[in-house]
Image: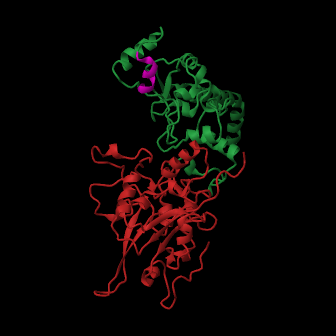
Amino acid sequence: MTQEYRKEKKYGMVIDLDRCTGCGACMVACMAENNVPFRDNETDKLKSITWMRIYQLTNGKSYPNEEICYLPRPCMHCEGHNGHSPCVTVCPAVATDYDRETGIVSQIPTRCFGCRYCMAACPYHARYFNWWDPVWPEGMEKSLSPNVSPRMRGVVEKCSFCFHRYQLAYEKAASEDRRELRENEYQTSCTQACPAGAITFGDLINKNHAVYKIKKDPRAFRLLERLKTNPKIYYLSSREWVRRAGDNYHPEEETGKIKSHQ
Amino acid sequence: MVQLTNSHKGNGNSGWTILFFIVGFTASLFAGWIVFPKLLYSKKQQPIDFNHELHMTHVDNGCESCHFFREDGTYSGVPKLVQCIDCHQEVQGDTGHEALFVEKYVSKGKEVPWLIYSRQPDCVFFSHAAHVKLAKMDCETCHGHIGQSTSLKPYEYNIITGYSRDIWGKNPENYLGLKTNTYDRMKMNDCAACHLEETGRKSSVSTEKDGCFVCHK
């Protein structure tokens, strides 16, 4: 039985920043879906845990020329070179791993011992540390998702592309004697929650998936491509200054010219 | 000179030293393999002593008569009262445990608090459909010959973690890390070994085995 089990996939996202209104529905959906803990006082945002986080970018000009762009930032699920993403390479506990079959960077909190090397290695600040055990307001524990294991104090967590949804979809497919999932069977929570339809999720190397075509849009760029992290989140923006904000550019340099690592 | 004398004296005692070492070593092994596991695990009896063999003679579809797949592909696991009531609205046979079951649970409409031998920690995802329908494995490979048993064994659990001992494995040879039957032990390494052997997948970059996110969540 050593046949190839499932076709190799690279699950990824294309986020259209021209459509994103910064409403935050993706952040809320993500927190609810993944049992992300929060505290009474979330004033110190450095300690907040947000697998999906919306950043506000400005073009740095003053009124009336000021422009705003909202940028949702999940985990980039970097492929790096042949699966050697920054966080996976540094983890001494094999708590985080790159899966060549799905292209997802996994995080197993029960295996993590909290050294936080991965947080230092991640150029996108996509990883978060649990400084406290999660405490939910009374009664709220009943609304937690049974498909996602809550994390404890002292471990790192991050976006998993709602991997439990993949597992459940795969289980359903298995019961129908299929090994391959349909595009609509596995979608992340943020994708489905976005009221503007800004997020498209799917297999980046499957020609039949929507993301395969959209990522070739001339507006597309990825964050910090020069680092060769080879991320699986593509952004679309028609505004030059937004694309410029995605990496460090020389003043005379044009965007869209960075040689992609893929 | 002093050193020489001392070392000479030491050599004379080496027989005793070795003997003490052996005695101490044996005692440690005894404590570690026999005494400690006894202290670490506690036992509970199941609320009702269920007879699998007897039920197997009355149902048409083997294990799947009661342990079935739901429509969304998930597995029903241990039957709920509503399934038992189909036959056990009233006492059918003459076993004491059935009478107890009807009296204590059926007539009161109360679920039986079964103790689940194979309950996994909540960071583990296990799909029965993937193993039974796709990989065509039979129940016995993992669960043993429970369908032919006439009574339920005691439920043993780790008093520190609360997890069932069946996840760890119980046969005496397991103390040595050996395993004679596939169903003796269901630790993570056993799952990983079987996955590597049966699927040959090496999708994990870090381990060159099956990925973590296959069974973990």
> In which image quadrant can residue A79 be found?
bottom right
Left of A192 or right of it: where is A78?
right
> In which image quadrant can residue A47 be found?
bottom left
Q: Is residue A229 visible from the viewing direction of this image? A: no
Q: Which residue sits at x=53%, y=53%? A: A95
Q: Say if A51 sits above or below B18 in the image.
A: below
The reply to whether the magenta stretch includes residue A152 is no
| Chain assigned red | A
Q: Percent x, y for residue A238?
A: 44, 81
Judging depth in this view, the residue of B26 and A71 nearest the camera is A71
Q: Main secondary structure of the magenta part?
A: helix
Q: Quadrant of the C terminus of chain A?
A: bottom right
Q: Percent x, y for residue B25?
A: 63, 30
The colour assigned to chain B within the rendered structure: green
The residue most toward the bottom is A252
Q: Which residue sits at x=72%, y=45%? A: A1
